[in-house]
Structure formats: C-alpha cells, structure tokens
C-alpha cells in the first residue's frame, strides 16, 4: 500500500526500535539496532520528527496546517503524519508506537496490540483517542468534543466529553485520570498525602477541603464560582486553580512537566494534554490553538495567526514561547519548570512568566485571565471577577483546580505524577484517593468504572463489581495491578519498574515485591503490611507483624525504611535523597533524620508528633500536644504530617521547599520560626495570623489584624508574605526561591521586590504589572506600561530579562541556569544562549528560529534560514545534530550514547552511525 503523505512504520524487534521506509512525502524509519533510535525525512510542508534517544529530543517541520508526529519509543513521544489538517498515527507494535490514518480533518488511530498503543477512529471533525497504556495518548471527541480514555501510569488523561464537556476516566495509581462529568458540578474528595484534591460541590459550587500536607487545595465556591486556595509549596510545577464562565479558559494539566495542551473555541481555551512526557497536541482553526509538540522534553512549537496561538518551544527544559494578538494567546515559557507565561489583550490571556523557578504572572482585564505565578514552590494566586479565570497552581503534584459552568471542564487531579483522576456525576467530579503511592481508588456503582487490562505492556486491567475496583497490573511497565474485594484493594505488582504490588485480604494491603529493581514486596496478614525487600537496588524491605509496618530502606535510591510496632510507623531514611526516617512507638510517629539531606527527625510520645530537627538542612521541628496538628515538612517529596483538633492547624515549615510551619491555637494559626533552618515563626491571637520572622533563615513574619493575613517574607527560604485587606491579596516576596510578593489593591497585584535574594518587586496601576528588580540576585525587574510587560533579567540566578514593547516580549537570558534569552522584534523571538549550561541561543529574523548550541552540555545548536532548522549536535550527551537544507533534516550522530546519525539528501536518510551503510 503506497500513499502520499503517509507514515510507514516497521518495528521489527523488542528493543522498541522503529524501522520503515517512506516515499513520496512519507517518513521512512530504519531502526536496525538495539539503541532504539529513530530517524526520518519529510518534505513539502510536512513535519519530520526524529526522536532518536531517550533524551526526548525531537525535530519537525510543519506547514500547511499539518502536524506530523513520529512517536516510536518509550519516552512517551508522539509520531504521526498530518495531511490536510489531519493527524495520522500508526502504531503497530508493542514498543508503544502510535499508528493511525486520518482523512478529511479526522484523526484516526489504530492501535492493534497490547503494548499500550493508541487506537481510535475519527470521523467528521472528531478526535477519537483510545489510549490504554503508559505512552500517554488519549481521547475521544465527537461533535467538537474531546473524549479521553487514559488508563495508565504515565500521567495521561482519560475522559469522555459530551456536549462540550470533558469526562476523564483515570483508573490506576500512577496518577492516571478517571472521571465522569455531567450537569456541571465538581466534587473532589482528597483523603491522602499525595497532593490530591478533596472537596464537595453542591448547586454548581465547588468546595474544596484539603486535609493533607502534600499541597492540597482548599477553597470555597458559591454561586457558580470557584475559589481556590493553594496553601503549600510542595513542588514547583505549580497547581492551577481558576474560574471560568463565558469566555473562560478550561485547562487540563495532567503531568508533572507542567505542559499545557488544549482546544480553544469561541474565545475559550481547551487543553488536551495527553502524555507524561509533557507533550502537547491540539488543533485550532478560526480562533483555535495550534500546537506542535514534537519531543518528550515537553517542548512546544507552533505558529498561530488570526486568533490562533503561537507556541515556540525550542529546548528540552520544557519552555514555551509564543506570541498572540487579536484574540490570541501569547505564551512565554522561559524556565525549566515548564511553566507558561504570555501576554493577552482584548479577550486574550496574559501570562507573565518571569523567572526560572517556573512562576507565572499576568494581568487580565475585561474577561481576561489573571495569573500570578511567581515562585518555584509552584504557588499561583489570582483574582477573577466578571467571568474571568484565576488559577492557582502551586506544586508539581499536578493538582489543578478550576470552575467551569455551562459546558465547562472538570478536572480530577489525584496524585503526584500530575495526572488527573476523578468521577463526575451530574457534572460533578468525585475523587477518592486513598493511599500515598499515588494510586487512585474510588467507589463506583451504577455506571461504575471497570478496567480490563490483559497483557504485559503495562496496561491496566481490572474488574469492578459492587462498588469495588479491581486492578490487575502484571508487567514491568510500571502500571498498577490490584484486586478489590469487599471494599479492599489488592495490588499485585511483580516487575522491576519500582511499582507496587500487593494483595489485600480482609481490609489488609499485601505487597509482594520480588525483584531488585526497586519494587516493593511484602505480605500482609491480619491488618498488617509486610514488605520484603531483599536486594541492594534501593527497594523496600520490612516485616510487619501485629498491625505494624516495617520499612527498611538501605540505599540512596530514596526509598523508605522503618520499623513499626504496635500500630506504629517506623521510618528509617539513611540516604541523601531526602526521604523520611523515624521511629514510631505507641501510635506515634517518630522521625529520625540524621543527615544533611533534609530528612526529618523527631520523637513522638503519647499520641503526639514530636519533631526534632537537629541539623542545618532546613528540616522541621515542632511539638504537638493534645490532639493538635503539627506539620513538619522535611524533604522535597512534599509530605506533611500533623495533628488537628479543636479546629486548629499547626504548621511547621522549616526547609527551603517553601512549605509552611506554625502553631494554631483557638482557630488561629501560630507560626514559630526559631532557628536558621528556614522555619516560620509567628503568633496569632483572636482569629488572626501573626507571623514574626526574626532571623535570616527565610522564615515568615507578618501581622494579621481583623481577619486579614499579613505575610512578610524577608529571606531566601522562599516563604510567602502577604497582606490581605478587603478581599485583596498582598504578597511581599523578597527572596531568591521564587516566592510571591505583591500588593493587591482594587483587583490589582503589586509586587514589591526590594532585596538581593531574588524577590519580585513591582507596582500595578491601572491594570498593569510593574516589576522592579534592582539587585544582582536574579530577581525580576521591569516596567509595565500600556499593557506591556518588561522583564529585565541581569544575573546568573536563571531569571529572565526582557523588554516588551508594542505587545512584544523580549527575553534576555545570559546566565548558566539554562534559561532562555532572546529578543522579540516584530512578532519574532530571538534567543541568545551563550554559555555552557546547555541553554539555547539563537537569533530569529523574519519569522525564523535560529538555534546555536556551542557547548558540550548536549544542547541543540543550529542555524535556521528560510524556514529551515539546522541542528548541530557535537557532544556525547546523546542530543541530535544535523543540518537541514531545503526542508530536510540531517542528523549526524557521532557518539556512543546510541543516538542516530545520518544524512538526509533529497528525501533520503543515510545512516552510518549504526547501520554502517547508507540507504
């Protein structure tokens, strides 16, 4: 069978390699060896992506509104061929490739085997995705709808959308999504510490109640509004929250790379974010969004004109850039945290993403979106009035919150992989998230969710009967298997991907982890959890007897070890990965954190949690007595512990991850930050929150009076300071951890960044955002006048500097933190990346992007002239090098990292790196 503009894949071996031959505007892959590299060639306005190694780099070229994806390997990349506004995927084998054929504006996926490929059929402007495995493709779309079905653990999305709704079904514990949405309410129930969302929505409201310390969301929604409050900084990918009505924006943000994808219709933005590699896909026409997302590093590229979105994503740090005017969306994504920034005017979206900590900031008026995302703790805050959306996306656990009514989008985001899960009934989303392994559990009866995953490609299988969910995950692709009987959850995870396996009998959880690849093994009897971890690969071992959990974590892979006796949990965390260690005696949790990796140590007696943090790694210390909650946030895993009674919350936030610590008494929040490890101190009286931050360890200080919250964050530990008066939020963020500071007055957000610790300063007047960054700590400085944003990033802290004039955004990225610098003139983006930290440099003229990659950090270098992209990959980090001339892509792969080398001449691909021949 020979067609024009086709993609032929031939995947002969089990190494996940691809081979194929494409003629007459086709893509030929020849993958002869076990390095699993891919190469291809596309001409005549097509996109040729070459995804050779596991570094997730891709190249491609798209013209005439087509997107060609080639997704051959296990890094979660996408491959396909789009002709006449179509996307063709062909995924024939078990290496997780995608196959499909699309004709007449359809997307057809055909996924025949059990390796978790995608299959689907699209007819008449629909997109049908069936994504069973962990490569992360999803969706089913009918009549301008998008249906996702995402069953596996790579953080993909699944769902079903009917009448402009999006329903997600996400069945497993690796951060998959599940859900059903009808009649416009979102119910979240988030019970565990993996950063899930909990809440209850009634009468088109969304109420969040976030009980645990993993950066959950809390808020109150009344009369079709959604108010999100995202309290902690447990990670830097930033959760989202917002409000969308009439010209609103619906976001789907599933994975931890912080990428966004969607679909915009009639001044709305719908994102479809399919896989865990942070790839984006989408097609927009007539005020739509065009994404070209070629590689697994979460890069975006695209060009949108006439109410479209232009993304330009050049490097593997997951940065995005774009320019949108006339109802378009402008994105500027400068740093490696994968956040987004942009500028929107006249029903546009304004993103201002100033620094390398992945913060987003923006100002929107007249049905626009205001984002304020300043720091690396991933906290976002905003205010939406009159049909605007305010998102607050604080951490990398991928939690999203939003409000959508009248054809809105319901998100379910349960675990730390940034996936989404949920159940929507009568337009509500119900989440039940029971455990800390990031598994999702729920109760489904009458329209419940049944998973059936029969093969070893890491798919999900299960059977749901009478309010049970049975998962059966047999192989090493890291999926979850489980058997649930009588309200039990049985996990059976046998392989080396470090997943969890277990068997639950009579309300027990049995884990059986047999091998040395870091899996968990155990046997649970009589309400116990027994783990047995026999080898040195950093797995978990332990023995549980009589309601105890024994963990033994011996190595540096960041597992947990502990000893639990008599309903205790003993953790022993000896290595530098910042895990938790402790000793629990008599229903107590004792943490012992001996080293400088920021572990937790403490001693608990008589149902209290005592934390003792002796070292300078910024651990948490505190004392909890009489049924109170003391939170200790020790490491970067974002776990929180505490005890709350009498409606008090005690926080203790000592370390540089931007968490919060404090002591609350009589409905107050008292923070006490006594030492130099960056704890918080404060005193609250009469329903106020007083922070007093006396030392240089980056604690918080402030004063709260008459139901206001005053935060004063003077140091570099990345805490937040804020002043709220009359429904305003004032942030004062002085330090270099990328927290937020500002002053909000009359729906404005003012940032004041006075010091050298990389704080943000600015003054907003008349719907503008002014940043003033005076010092050399890599803060942001700029001046915003007449709907412009000026960034000035002068130092090596990896912040961004730029100057925006006449709706332009200029980035200047001079330092070694791998940020992006560039200068945008006349709708161009110029990147200049001069140093060896693997940044990107280039100069864009006449709508071109020039990359110049001079150093050995494995970045991309090249020169783009006349709509070409030239890559030059000189070093052994396994990047891609090549030269593209006349719509060709030439690869030259000289090193031993198993990349691809070749030379493409007149629609041919010559390999001589692994084939030893030319073809």
Image (cartoon, grey):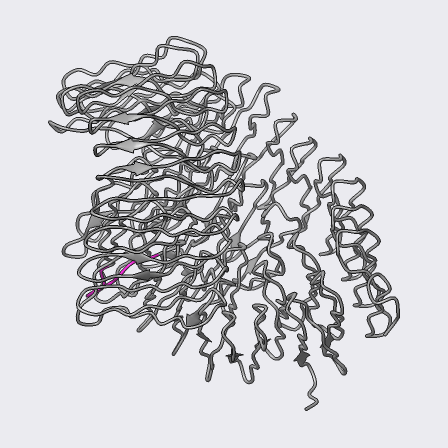
Quadrant of the rendered structure where residue 655 is? top left
Can you see residue 245? no
Quadrant of residue 902 in the image? bottom right
Question: Where 311 sits versus 831, above or below?
Answer: below
Q: Is residue 916 visible?
A: yes
Residue furthest toward the right? 917
Which contiguous range is marked in magenta?
421-428
Is 142 on the left-hand or right-hand side of 87? Answer: left
- Answer with the quarter of the image where residue 571 lies: top left
* Position in image of residue 806 (x %, y %): 60, 44
Q: Residue at x 20, y 47 (%)?
A: 526
Q: Main secondary structure of the magenta part?
A: loop
Q: Nearer the viewer, residue 638 or 304?
A: 638
Residue 410 magenta-drawn?
A: no
Q: Which one is in front, 721 or 11?
A: 11
Q: Residue at x 28, y 14 (%)?
A: 682
């Amino acid at each position: 069978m020979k067609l024009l503009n086709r993609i032929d894949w031939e995947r002969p071996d089990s190494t996940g390699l691809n081979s194929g031959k494409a003629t007459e505007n086709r893509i030929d892959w020849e993958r002869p060896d076990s390095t699993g590299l891919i190469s291809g060639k596309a001409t005549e306005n097509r996109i040729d992506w070459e995804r050779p190694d596991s570094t997730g780099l891709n190249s491609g070229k798209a013209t005439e509104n087509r997107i060609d994806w080639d997704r051959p390997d296990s890094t979660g990349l996408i491959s396909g061929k789009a002709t006449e506004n179509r996307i063709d995927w062909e995924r024939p084998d078990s290496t997780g490739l995608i196959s499909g054929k699309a004709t007449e504006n359809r997307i057809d996926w055909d996924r025949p085997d059990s390796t978790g490929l995608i299959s689907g059929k699209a007819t008449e402007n629909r997109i049908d995705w069936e994504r069973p495995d962990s490569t992360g493709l999803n969706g089913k779309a009918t009549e301008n709808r998008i249906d996702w079905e995402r069953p596996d653990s790579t953080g993909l999305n699944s769902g079903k959308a009917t009448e402009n709704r999006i329903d997600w079904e996400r069945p497993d514990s690796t951060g998959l999504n599940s859900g059903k949405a009808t009649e416009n309410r979102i119910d979240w129930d988030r019970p565990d510490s993996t950063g899930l969302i909990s809440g209850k929505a009634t009468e088109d409201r969304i109420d969040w109640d976030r009980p645990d310390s993993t950066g959950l969301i809390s808020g109150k929604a009344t009369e079709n509004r959604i108010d999100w409050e995202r309290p902690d900084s447990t990670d830097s990918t930033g959760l989202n929250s917002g409000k969308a009505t009439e010209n609103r924006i619906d976001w789907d943000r599933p994975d931890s790379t912080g990428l966004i994808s969607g679909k915009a219709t009639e001044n709305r933005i719908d994102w479809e974010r399919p896989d865990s590699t942070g790839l984006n896909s989408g097609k927009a026409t007539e005020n739509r969004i065009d994404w070209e997302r070629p590689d697994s590093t979460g890069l975006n590229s695209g060009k949108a004109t006439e109410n479209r979105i232009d993304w330009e994503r050049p490097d593997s740090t997951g940065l995005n850039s774009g320019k949108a005017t006339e109802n378009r969306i402008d994105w500027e994504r400068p740093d490696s945290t994968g956040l987004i920034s942009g500028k929107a005017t006249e029903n546009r979206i304004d993103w201002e993403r100033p620094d390398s900590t992945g913060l987003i900031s923006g100002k929107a008026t007249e049905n626009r979106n205001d984002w304020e995302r300043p720091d690396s703790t991933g906290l976002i805050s905003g205010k939406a009035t009159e049909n605007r959306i305010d998102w607050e996306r604080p951490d990398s656990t991928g939690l999203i919150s939003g409000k959508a009514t009248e054809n809105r989008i319901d998100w379910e985001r349960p675990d730390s992989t940034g996936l989404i899960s949920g159940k929507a009934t009568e337009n509500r989303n119900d989440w039940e998230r029971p455990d800390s392994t990031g598994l999702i559990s729920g109760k489904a009866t009458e329209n419940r969710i049944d998973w059936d995953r029969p093969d070893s490609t890491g798919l999900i299988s299960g059977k749901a009967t009478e309010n049970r969910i049975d998962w059966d995950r047999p192989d090493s692709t890291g999926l979850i298997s489980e058997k649930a009987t009588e309200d039990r959850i049985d996990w059976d995870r046998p392989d080396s991907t470090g997943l969890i396996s277990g068997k639950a009998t009579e309300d027990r959880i049995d884990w059986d982890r047999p091998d040395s690849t870091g899996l968990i093994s155990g046997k649970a009897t009589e309400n116990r959890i027994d783990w047995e971890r026999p080898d040195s690969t950093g797995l978990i071992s332990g023995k549980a007897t009589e309601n105890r959990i024994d963990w033994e974590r011996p190595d540096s892979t960041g597992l947990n070890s502990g000893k639990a006796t008599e309903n205790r949990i003993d953790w022993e965390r000896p290595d530098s990965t910042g895990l938790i260690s402790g000793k629990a005696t008599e229903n107590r949790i004792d943490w012992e954190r001996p080293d400088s990796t920021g572990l937790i140590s403490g001693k608990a007696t008589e149902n209290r949690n005592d934390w003792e943090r002796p070292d300078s790694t910024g651990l948490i210390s505190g004392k909890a007595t009489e049924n109170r909650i003391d939170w200790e946030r020790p490491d970067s895993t974002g776990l929180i512990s505490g005890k709350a009674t009498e409606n008090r919350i005690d926080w203790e936030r000592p370390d540089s991850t931007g968490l919060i610590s404090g002591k609350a008494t009589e409905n107050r929040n008292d923070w006490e930050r006594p030492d130099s490890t960056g704890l918080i101190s404060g005193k609250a009286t009469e329903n106020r929150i007083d922070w007093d931050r006396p030392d240089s360890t980056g604690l918080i200080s402030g004063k709260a009076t008459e139901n206001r919250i005053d935060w004063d964050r003077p140091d570099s530990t990345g805490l937040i300071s804020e002043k709220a008066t009359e429904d305003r939020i004032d942030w004062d963020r002085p330090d270099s951890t990328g927290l937020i500071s500002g002053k909000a007055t009359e729906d404005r957000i003012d940032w004041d960044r006075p010091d050298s610790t990389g704080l943000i300063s600015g003054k907003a007047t008349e719907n503008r955002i002014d940043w003033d960054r005076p010092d050399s700590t890599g803060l942001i400085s700029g001046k915003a006048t007449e709907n412009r944003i000026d960034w000035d990033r002068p130092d090596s802290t990896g912040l961004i500097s730029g100057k925006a004039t006449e709706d332009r955004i200029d980035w200047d990225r001079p330092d070694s933190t791998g940020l992006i610098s560039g200068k945008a003139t006349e709708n161009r983006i110029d990147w200049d990346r001069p140093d060896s930290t693997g940044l990107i440099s280039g100069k864009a003229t006449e709508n071109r992007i020039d990359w110049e990659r001079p150093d050995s950090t494995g970045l991309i270098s090249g020169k783009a002239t006349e709509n070409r992209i030239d890559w030059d990959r000189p070093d052994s980090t396994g990047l891609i090098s090549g030269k593209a001339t006349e719509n060709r892509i030439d690869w030259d792969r000289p090193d031993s990292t198993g990349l691809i080398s070749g030379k493409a001449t007149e629609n041919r691909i010559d390999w001589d790196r692994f084939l030893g021949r030319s073809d």
